[in-house]
C-alpha cells in the first residue's frame, strides 16, 4: 500500500515537473527542444538498448523527418498532420531499405555501414539544393495549426509537443514490454541462441530498426516546425553521434535513461555554451568517464544509489 | 499646497514612466568560437565600441546581448529565438554565415523585430522582409566589382575556383554575369568542398586552361590553401590572382609573400582615404591590438545606424525605427556617402579595389593592402529590382 | 567546364588519327597533367596508407575501432608544430620526436583507459575512443587556439624537381618516399622479427597467444603505440601540406575507415593497396567527376560492405 502511494507521488511529481518545465528553463522553446530530442532518444533506445545494434546513421531519419515535413508544409499542403504522416512514411521506407541491405551484417561493420549511409545522405542533401536548400538549409517552415489548435505561441506549442511526447513514451513502453520486446532482449543477449530457437532474428532486428526510425523522423518533423527551419546538419554524423551520446549517458536499455539523457544534454548544451566556448571538452570528459565507470548510464546509477538510501 | 502636491504627483508619474520604459536592447550573434572566432570577436568589439560611443538612447544606457553561434545555422536560429523571446531584444546585429543569417531573418519576421545583417553576404537577404536590413557588403557587390574592374584592368581570360556551398555558388553566378557583360571569357571553374587542404589538383587544372586571371571564390583557410598551392606550382607569377574575400588575418597566418600582388574587393579597409577612417582604425587598434576588418567596421556602422534611427524615431517601436532607417542618408568613416534604400533595405556601400603589398612596401603593422581603384555604390551595388523588393 | 573541353579534344584527336598526327605539345600537356594528378593521388594515398596501417593493426590485434585515430593524426601535426615553432628545432627532429610523442600518448591511453573495456562488447571501446576524439580535439582548441597554426615546408624541400616529363614539388615526393620506407619497415618488422610474429599471431587469435604464456597485455599496448605513432607520423608529414587545425583529423578519419574496410580490417597488404587505390580514386574523382567525388568513396564502401564485408584482403573471421 505504501509503495503504491510512493509510486503515485513519484508520478505526480514527474508530471508536475513536465507541466512546469517551460517556466523552469531560461526560455520556453528550450523545453520544447528537450522533449523533441527525448522522443528521438527513446526511439533510439529500442534499436541500441534493446536490440543491441549501434547505429551511427540515425540522423538520416531525423533529417528525412525534418526535411519531409518542411517540404510538405511549404510545397504541398499546410497540414501538420499530413506532413508528419508523409515524412514518417518516407522514413519508414528508407529505413526498410537500409535495414534490408545492412541488418545481416554484424558487429563493427554494421556501425561502419550506417556511418557510410549517413555521409551519403548528407552529401545528397548538400548537392540537391533545389529540394533541400543545400547548406543554406530549408527555410520558411510554417507553424500551421493542428486542427483547431493554434500553435504560434511557444507555450501552446510546448503542450502540444508534451502530448505527443507522452504518447510516444507510452508507445515505446508498450513495444518494449510486449513479446516483441522480449525477443529483442533475447537476441541482444545471444543472437545465435535466439535463432536456434526458431526466431527470424533478421526480421526482428529490421522491425526494431524501423521503429527507431519512426521515432527519429517524428522528432525530426517536430523539430522542423519548432525551428521554422531545417539546417543541413540534421543529417550530419554529428547529429547521429549526439543521439548515441544522449542514449548512452542516460542509460541504454531503460527507456527513461535516454529520455533524461537527451533532456539533460540539450539543456546543458544551451546553458554551458553561453558561458563556456569549449562545451565539447566537458561533454567528451563526461562521456569517457561514463563509458568507463557507469556503463549502465548516469541515471540508472543515480537511481540505484538513491534506492539504496531510501 | 494642493497644487504643489499635484505637481509632485505629476512629476512622480512622469519620471516613473520614463524609468519604467525599457532600455534599448541590442542582440548580437556571430561566430565567437572555432577557427573563425577572430572575425566574430572583432565584430563584437566594434559593436561594443559603437554602443559605448553612441551613449545613452532614449535616456537610458543601451544593453548589449552577445551570443555565439559557432558558425552553425541551427544554433543561430535558436540564439535568435532566445534573444527575441528571453532577452526581448529590439534588434539583432551581425550574424556571419549566410544560412544562419537567413534563419535569423526569418525569426526577425516572426517576432516582428529588426535584424541588421552585416557579415553574411547572400543576396537572398536583400528585400527579404521589412524587418531585415542588409548592411555592409553583399555577394553581388563583391563579384560585380571584381568582375567589372578586373576585366577592364587585369585581363580577359578568367578561371574560377569556387567553394562548393551556397555562398560560393552565389558569388560564381554574379561573377560570371559581370564578366560576360565586360566581354571577358570564363575559361573554367572548379567546385571545391569547403575546408579542402590540398588544392593542387585544381591548380593544375587551372594552369592547363591558361587564364590571365585566377579568381578564388573562397574565404579563410580555403583562400590560404588555394593561394599556397598556386604559388607552389608557380602560378602566382604568370597569372594574376583575385580573391573574393581576403583579410589581414589570412595574410598574417600564411605570410605576406604568399599573397603579395593579389587583388580583392571590399566595402572598406583601414587604409582607405576616407574622413575618419584612420582615426577609427587607430582607436580600435589601441583598444584591441590589431587592425579592424571591414566586418568589424560594418558592425560598428550597423549598430550606430540602428541606435541613431531609434533616436530619430524617438521610439523603439520597430515600425517607427524602420521608417527612420528607410531612405536615410549619412556620411561616416565606413560609408561616405551612405544611403539605406527604402525599396529593399539595402545599405548602398561603395567598393574599393585592393591589392596586397609587396613585403618591402609595408610600412607599419598590418599595412598589407593598398587601394588601386574604387567603384561607387551606384555602379557596384545591384539595381533596384534585381533582387527582391518590399511592398 | 574543364571536363567538357577535354572530351571535345578527345574527339578531335580521334578524327585526326588517320591523317597527320597532332603536334606533340598537346600530348605532353596531357601526360604532364594526368601524371601530376596521379602523383597527387600517390601523395594522398600515402597518408591513407600510414593511417590505415595503424587503424588496421589496432583493430586486428585489439579489436578496437579507434575513432580517435584522426585525433592522433592531428596530435602529430601539433607535436611537430610545437617542436619546430615553440622549441625552434628543425623539421627533421620533429619527424622523429612527434611520432614518438604520439606513440607514447597512445600507449598511455591504451594501458589506462582502453584496457579496462576489453572484457566488454567491442562497441564500448568504440564509444570510448569516440569520446576521446571529442575530448582531444577540444583540448587542443583550448591549449593552442581554435584558429590553427601555420606550418611551412622545410627549407630543404621547398621547390620542385624536374622528373623529366613534369615538375613535381619536392616535398610531396618526400612524403611518398617516407611512406614507402615505413610500409616496407613495418612489413619487415612483422614478418622477420619475433615480436612481429607474436603480433601477427595475436592478430589471428589473441587468446591462443596468451594461452601460450606470452604477455599479450604488453604487446597490446605496444601495438596501440605503433598504430598511434604511424598516425602521428602522417600528421607530421601533413603539417606543411594540410592545415594544422584541431579539426584536421575528422574528414580523414572517415576516409581512412573506408580504406580499411575496402582493404580489409587487420590486413597490412590491404591497408597499403587500399590506401593507394583510394588516394588515386579521390584525386582523379575530383579532377574528372567533381560533383560526386566525395560520395563516390562512401558508395564504394557500402558496396564492399554488402558484397564482401571482409574487404579485399581481410580475414573472414572479422565478419563476426
Image: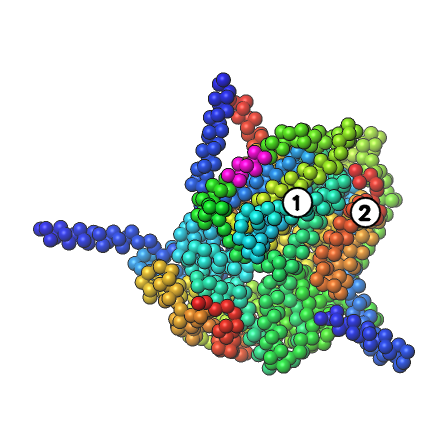
Point out the frontmost of discs 2 and 1.
Answer: 1
Q: Quadrant of residue B166?
A: bottom right
* Colour mapping: rainbow
Q: Is residue C292 magenta?
A: no
**Label 1: chain?**
A
What's the CA distance linking mark 2 and mark 1?
Answer: 24 Å
Q: Quadrant of residue A177?
A: top right
Residue at 27% across / 55% down in the picture? B18
Position of C164 with respect to B122 (left or right) is: right
Which label sits on residue C307? 2
Q: Quadrant of the N terminus of chain C?
A: bottom right
Residue at 84% across / 30% down in the picture? C212
Position above or below: A176 against A133: above
Provide residue A129's location: percent of width, then percent of height.
62, 60
**Label 2: chain?**
C
Q: Which residue is mark 1?
A: A92
The rendered magenta stretch, by its main secondary structure, is classed as: helix
Q: Quadrant of residue B231?
A: bottom right
Position above or below: B335 against C93: below
Provide residue B62's location: percent of width, then percent of height.
36, 57
Q: Secondary structure at mark 1?
A: helix
Residue at 78% across / 34% down in the picture? C216
Q: Which residues are magenta?
A: A163-171
Report whether residue C74 is seen. no
Which label sits on residue A293? none
Position above or below: B60 against A32: below
Q: Is residue A170 magenta?
A: yes
**B206, C203: nearer the viewer:** B206
Amino acid at each position: 500500500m505504501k509503495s503504491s502511494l510512493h509510486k503515485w507521488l513519484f508520478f505526480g511529481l514527474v508530471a508536475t515537473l513536465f507541466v512546469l518545465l517551460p517556466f523552469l528553463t531560461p526560455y520556453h522553446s528550450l523545453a520544447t527542444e528537450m522533449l523533441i530530442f527525448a522522443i528521438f532518444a527513446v526511439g533510439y533506445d529500442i534499436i541500441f538498448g534493446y536490440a543491441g545494434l549501434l547505429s551511427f546513421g540515425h540522423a538520416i531519419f531525423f533529417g528525412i523527418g525534418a526535411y519531409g515535413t518542411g517540404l510538405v508544409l511549404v510545397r504541398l499542403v499546410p497540414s501538420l498532420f499530413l506532413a508528419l504522416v508523409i515524412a514518417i512514411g518516407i522514413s519508414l521506407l528508407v529505413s526498410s531499405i537500409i535495414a534490408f541491405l545492412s541488418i545481416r551484417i554484424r558487429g563493427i561493420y554494421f556501425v561502419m555501414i550506417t556511418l557510410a549511409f549517413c555521409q551519403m545522405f548528407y552529401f545528397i542533401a548538400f548537392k540537391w539544393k533545389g529540394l533541400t536548400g543545400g547548406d543554406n538549409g530549408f527555410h520558411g517552415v510554417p507553424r500551421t495549426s493542428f486542427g483547431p489548435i493554434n500553435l504560434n505561441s511557444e507555450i501552446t506549442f510546448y503542450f502540444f509537443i508534451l502530448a505527443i511526447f507522452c504518447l510516444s513514451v507510452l508507445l515505446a513502453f508498450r513495444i518494449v514490454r510486449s513479446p516483441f520486446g522480449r525477443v529483442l532482449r533475447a537476441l541482444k543477449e545471444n543472437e545465435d541462441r535466439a535463432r536456434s530457437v526458431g526466431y527470424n532474428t533478421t526480421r526482428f532486428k529490421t522491425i526494431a530498426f524501423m521503429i527507431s526510425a519512426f521515432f527519429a523522423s517524428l522528432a525530426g518533423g517536430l523539430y522542423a516546425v519548432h525551428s521554422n527551419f531545417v539546417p543541413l546538419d540534421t543529417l550530419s554524423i554529428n547529429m547521429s553521434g549526439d543521439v548515441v551520446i544522449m542514449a548512452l549517458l542516460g542509460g541504454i536499455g531503460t527507456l527513461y535513461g535516454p529520455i533524461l539523457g537527451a533532456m539533460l544534454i540539450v539543456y546543458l548544451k544551451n546553458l554551458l555554451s553561453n558561458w563556456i566556448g569549449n562545451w565539447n571538452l566537458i561533454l567528451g570528459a563526461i562521456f569517457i568517464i561514463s563509458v568507463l565507470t557507469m556503463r549502465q548510464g548516469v541515471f540508472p546509477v543515480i537511481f540505484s544509489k538513491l534506492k539504496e538510501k531510501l | 499646497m494642493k497644487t504643489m502636491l499635484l505637481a509632485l504627483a505629476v512629476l512622480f508619474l512622469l519620471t516613473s514612466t520614463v524609468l519604467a520604459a525599457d532600455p534599448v536592447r541590442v542582440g548580437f550573434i556571430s561566430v565567437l568560437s572555432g577557427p573563425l572566432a577572430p572575425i566574430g570577436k572583432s565584430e563584437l568589439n566594434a559593436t561594443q565600441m559603437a554602443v559605448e560611443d553612441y551613449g545613452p538612447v532614449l535616456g537610458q544606457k543601451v544593453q548589449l546581448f552577445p551570443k555565439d553561434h559557432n558558425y552553425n545555422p541551427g544554433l543561430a536560429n535558436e540564439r535568435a529565438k532566445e534573444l527575441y523571446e528571453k532577452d526581448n531584444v529590439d534588434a539583432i546585429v551581425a550574424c556571419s554565415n549566410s544560412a544562419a543569417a537567413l534563419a535569423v531573418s526569418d525569426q526577425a519576421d516572426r517576432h516582428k523585430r529588426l535584424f541588421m545583417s552585416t557579415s553574411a553576404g547572400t543576396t537572398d537577404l536583400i528585400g527579404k522582409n521589412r524587418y531585415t536590413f542588409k548592411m555592409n557588403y553583399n555577394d553581388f557587390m563583391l563579384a560585380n566589382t571584381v568582375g567589372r574592374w578586373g576585366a577592364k584592368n587585369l585581363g580577359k581570360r578568367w578561371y574560377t575556383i569556387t567553394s562548393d556551398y551556397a555562398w560560393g555558388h552565389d558569388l560564381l553566378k554574379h561573377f560570371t554575369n559581370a564578366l560576360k557583360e565586360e566581354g571577358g571569357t570564363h575559361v573554367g571553374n572548379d567546385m571545391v568542398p569547403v575546408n579542402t587542404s590540398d588544392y593542387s589538383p585544381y591548380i593544375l587544372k587551372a594552369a592547363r586552361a591558361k587564364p590571365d586571371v585566377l579568381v578564388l571564390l573562397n574565404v579563410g583557410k580555403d583562400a590560404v590553401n588555394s593561394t599556397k598551392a598556386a604559388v607552389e606550382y608557380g602560378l602566382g607569377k604568370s597569372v594574376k590572382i583575385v580573391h573574393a574575400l581576403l583579410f589581414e588575418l589570412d595574410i598574417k597566418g600564411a605570410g605576406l609573400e604568399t599573397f603579395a600582388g593579389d587583388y580583392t574587393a571590399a566595402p572598406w579597409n583601414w587604409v582607405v582615404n576616407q574622413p575618419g577612417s584612420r582615426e577609427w582604425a587607430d582607436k580600435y587598434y589601441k583598444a584591441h591590438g590589431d587592425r579592424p576588418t571591414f566586418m568589424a567596421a560594418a558592425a560598428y556602422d550597423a549598430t550606430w545606424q540602428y541606435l541613431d534611427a531609434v533616436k530619430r524615431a524617438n521610439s523603439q517601436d520597430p515600425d517607427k525605427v524602420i521608417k527612420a532607417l528607410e531612405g536615410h542618408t549619412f556620411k561616416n568613416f565606413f560609408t561616405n556617402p551612405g544611403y539605406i534604400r527604402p525599396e529593399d533595405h539595402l545599405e548602398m556601400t561603395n567598393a574599393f579595389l585592393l591589392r596586397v603589398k609587396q613585403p618591402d612596401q609595408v610600412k607599419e603593422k598590418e599595412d598589407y593592402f593598398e587601394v588601386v581603384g574604387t567603384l561607387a555604390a551606384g555602379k557596384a551595388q545591384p539595381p533596384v529590382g534585381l533582387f527582391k523588393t518590399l511592398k | 567546364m574543364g571536363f567538357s573541353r577535354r572530351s571535345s579534344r578527345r574527339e578531335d584527336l580521334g578524327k585526326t588519327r588517320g591523317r597527320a598526327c597532332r603536334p606533340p605539345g598537346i600530348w605532353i600537356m596531357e601526360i604532364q597533367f594526368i601524371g601530376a594528378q596521379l602523383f597527387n593521388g600517390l601523395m594522398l594515398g600515402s597518408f591513407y596508407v600510414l593511417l590505415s596501417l595503424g587503424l588496421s593493426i589496432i583493430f586486428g590485434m585489439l579489436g578496437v575501432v579507434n575513432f580517435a585515430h584522426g585525433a592522433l593524426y592531428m596530435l602529430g601535426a601539433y607535436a611537430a608544430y610545437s617542436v619546430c615553432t615553440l622549441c625552434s628545432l628543425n623539421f627533421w627532429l620533429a619527424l622523429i620526436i612527434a611520432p614518438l610523442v604520439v606513440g607514447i600518448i597512445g600507449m598511455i591511453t591504451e594501458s589506462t583507459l582502453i584496457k579496462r573495456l576489453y572484457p566488454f562488447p567491442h562497441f564500448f571501446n568504440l564509444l570510448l575512443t569516440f569520446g576521446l576524439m571529442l575530448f582531444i580535439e577540444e583540448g587542443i582548441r583550448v591549449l593552442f587556439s581554435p584558429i590553427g597554426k601555420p606550418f611551412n615546408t622545410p627549407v630543404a624541400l621547398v621547390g620542385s624537381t624536374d622528373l623529366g616529363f613534369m615538375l613535381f614539388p619536392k616535398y610531396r615526393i618526400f612524403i611518398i618516399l617516407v611512406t614507402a620506407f615505413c610500409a616496407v619497415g613495418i612489413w619487415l618488422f612483422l614478418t622477420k622479427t619475433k615480436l612481429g610474429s607474436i603480433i601477427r599471431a595475436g592478430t589471428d587469435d589473441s587468446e591462443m597467444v596468451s594461452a601460450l604464456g606470452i604477455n599479450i597485455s604488453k604487446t597490446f599496448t605496444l601495438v596501440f603505440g605503433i598504430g598511434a605513432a604511424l598516425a602521428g607520423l602522417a600528421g607530421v608529414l601533413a603539417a606543411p601540406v594540410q592545415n594544422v587545425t584541431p579539426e584536421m583529423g575528422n574528414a580523414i578519419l572517415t576516409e581512412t575507415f573506408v580504406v580499411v574496410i575496402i582493404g580489409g580490417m587487420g590486413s597490412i597488404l590491404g591497408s597499403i593497396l587500399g590506401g593507394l587505390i583510394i588516394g588515386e580514386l579521390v584525386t582523379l574523382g575530383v579532377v574528372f567527376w567533381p560533383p560526386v567525388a566525395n560520395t563516390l568513396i562512401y558508395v564504394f564502401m557500402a558496396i564492399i560492405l554488402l558484397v564482401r564485408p571482409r574487404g579485399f584482403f581481410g580475414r573472414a573471421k572479422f565478419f563476426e
